[in-house]
């Protein structure tokens, strides 16, 4: 059933007698949507053809018409054509690229090695888009409580520039492999400016049908239905549709294990030089992985991710373990620091370790690799009552579903 909002008497009283402002006609609307759909972050296939001044001017004019908080217009555009300057910027980017590559797990590093991440030397024009957090003065409308509105506004100018460039047949590649302060100094920019984007601009051989990172398998496009929430976060529903139940949808998509691969896995277990059952649950898990992948032995995914979900049990109060409750937070820190057994196993197969705080009793500091998804601060003592409410249990399961699908969408 289609949901409709309750009538607002005050809103009805404000309705003017005349018609609303007209929309674009079908052809105009499709042209706007077309340029949005076909905009691409380009790194390959640039041509050396010069960009006519009038074309570049139209692109910059479009960028300059972007909306901004408090009409502050905090952006500036530094147009770079000098080969020497572009070579210097290329060297900065390569240093950061190498540093990033060293931080990646083996599976991701192998994939990253094949990616082209910039086109600084391949394009006739580079454009640096900056944000001036002081522009408009201290009383800029809308920036009093949110000073980050300056770079956010400049990001809107980047989008306008990008769409206008696509309409002109120009490719744009956004380079983010920079130390921002290092670039400010290298370009001789005023120290109070923030760099929002470094863009490589030029004509291209073609615009790919899909984003280049999708084509390379680095990531996947997330469906719209994942990101639209009705009234409250987590109540996902597209306009005109009823909210969907993530848990029920996921359960409905689970297929039976492949009987042939499952049988082959158990036969393979019998041929191994070990007593039957010596590996305990690992034997069952390995067989299940074969059934899931429909192959025996199951392939090791690459790149891969291991998700560790951390939480505290309220029953700890009954003395069921000699370890103090604080050990949970200490183990989370160990996982994040790479010192746990699961980190060692993950390293062997080149996998990334992702730690999810779904219910640790204490507050954990923000740390790279930690996903804060706390449903509650530990469970209650199950010997004195329910450990969790049914809704909390469902929410925790859905945290697992969302984590898994997000990791897959990120290319794992």
Image (cartoon, rainbow, N blue to C red):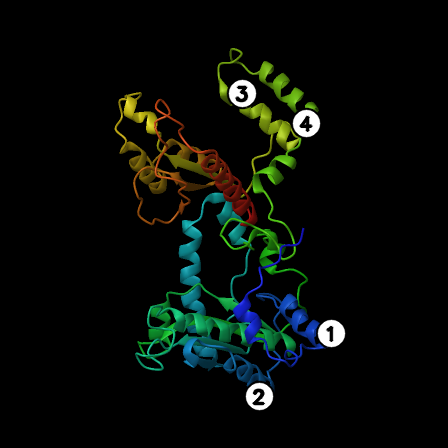
Of badges 1 and 4, the one in the foreground is 1
Neighbours of disc 4 within 10 Å: few (<14), some (14-19), many (20+): some
Can you tell which quarter of the image residue 23 is in? bottom right
Q: Is residue 384 above or below residue 198?
A: above
Of badges 3 and 4, the one in the foreground is 4
What residue is disc 2 on?
A: 53
Which circle's residue, 3 or 1, is located before the other in the chain?
1
What residue is disc 1 on?
A: 26
Q: CA distance from mark 3 to mark 1?
A: 60 Å
**Residues under numbered marks 1 and 2 in contact, where contact means CB atoms less than 8 Å apart:** no
Neighbours of disc 1 within 10 Å: few (<14), some (14-19), many (20+): few
Foreground of the two, 137 or 154? 137
At numbered mark 1, what does the secondary structure look like: helix, strand or loop? helix
Residue drawn at x 49%, y 52% as measured from the top left? 233
Count of numbered marks: 4
**Residues under numbered marks 3 and 2 in contact, where contact means CB atoms less than 8 Å apart:** no
What residue is disc 4 on?
A: 258
At numbered mark 3, what does the secondary structure look like: helix, strand or loop? helix
Residue drawn at x 42%, y 36% as measured from the top left? 309
Q: CA distance from mark 1 to mark 2?
A: 32 Å
Q: CA distance from mark 4 to mark 2?
A: 62 Å
Which circle's residue, 1 or 2, is located before the other in the chain?
1
Which circle's residue, 1 or 4, is located before the other in the chain?
1
Can you tell which quarter of the image residue 327 is in? top left
Which circle's residue, 3 or 4, is located before the other in the chain?
4
Q: Is residue 117 above or below residue 166?
A: above
State the image coordinates of residue 133 (x, y, percent, origin top left): 35, 75
What residue is disc 3 on?
A: 283
Q: Is residue 379 left or right of residue 2?
A: left
Q: CA distance from mark 3 to mark 4?
A: 16 Å
At numbered mark 4, what does the secondary structure look like: helix, strand or loop? loop
């Amino acid at each position: 059933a289609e949901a409709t909002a309750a009538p607002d008497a005050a809103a009805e009283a404000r309705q003017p007698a005349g018609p609303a402002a007209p929309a674009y006609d079908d052809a105009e609307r499709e042209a706007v949507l077309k340029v949005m759909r076909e905009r691409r972050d380009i790194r390959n296939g640039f041509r050396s053809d010069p960009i006519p001044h009038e074309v570049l001017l139209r692109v910059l004019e479009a960028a300059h018409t972007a909306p901004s908080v408090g009409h502050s217009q905090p952006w500036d555009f530094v147009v770079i054509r000098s080969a020497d300057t572009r070579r210097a910027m290329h060297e900065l980017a390569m240093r950061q690229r190498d540093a990033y590559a060293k931080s990646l797990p083996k599976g991701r590093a192998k994939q990253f090695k094949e990616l082209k991440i910039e086109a600084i030397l391949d394009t006739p024009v580079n454009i640096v888009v900056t944000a001036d957090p002081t522009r408009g003065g201290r009383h800029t409308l809308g920036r009093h409580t949110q000073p980050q509105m300056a770079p956010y506004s400049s990001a809107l100018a980047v989008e306008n520039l990008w769409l206008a460039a696509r309409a002109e047949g120009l490719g744009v590649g956004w380079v983010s492999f920079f130390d921002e302060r290092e670039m400010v100094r290298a370009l001789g920019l005023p120290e109070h400016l923030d760099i929002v984007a470094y863009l490589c601009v030029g004509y291209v051989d073609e615009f790919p049908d899909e984003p280049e990172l999708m084509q390379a398998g680095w990531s996947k496009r997330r469906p719209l239905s994942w990101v639209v929430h009705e009234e409250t976060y987590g109540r996902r529903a597209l306009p005109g549709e009823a909210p969907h139940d993530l848990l029920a949808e996921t359960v409905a998509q689970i297929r039976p294990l492949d009987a042939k691969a499952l049988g082959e896995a158990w036969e393979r277990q019998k041929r191994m030089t070990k007593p039957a059952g010596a590996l305990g649950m690992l034997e069952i898990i390995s067989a299940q992985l074969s059934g899931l992948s429909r192959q025996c032995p199951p392939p090791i995914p690459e790149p891969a991710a291991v998700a560790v979900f951390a939480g505290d049990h309220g029953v700890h109060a009954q003395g069921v373990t000699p370890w103090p409750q604080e050990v949970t937070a200490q183990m989370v820190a160990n996982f994040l620091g790479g010192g746990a057994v699961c980190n060692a196993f993950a390293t062997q197969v080149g996998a990334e370790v992702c730690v999810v705080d779904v219910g640790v009793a204490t507050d954990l500091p923000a740390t790279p690799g930690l996903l804060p998804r706390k449903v509650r601060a530990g469970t209650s003592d199950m010997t004195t009552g329910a450990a969790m409410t049914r809704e909390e249990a469902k929410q925790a399961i859905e945290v697992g579903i969302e984590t898994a699908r997000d990791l897959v969408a990120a290319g794992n």
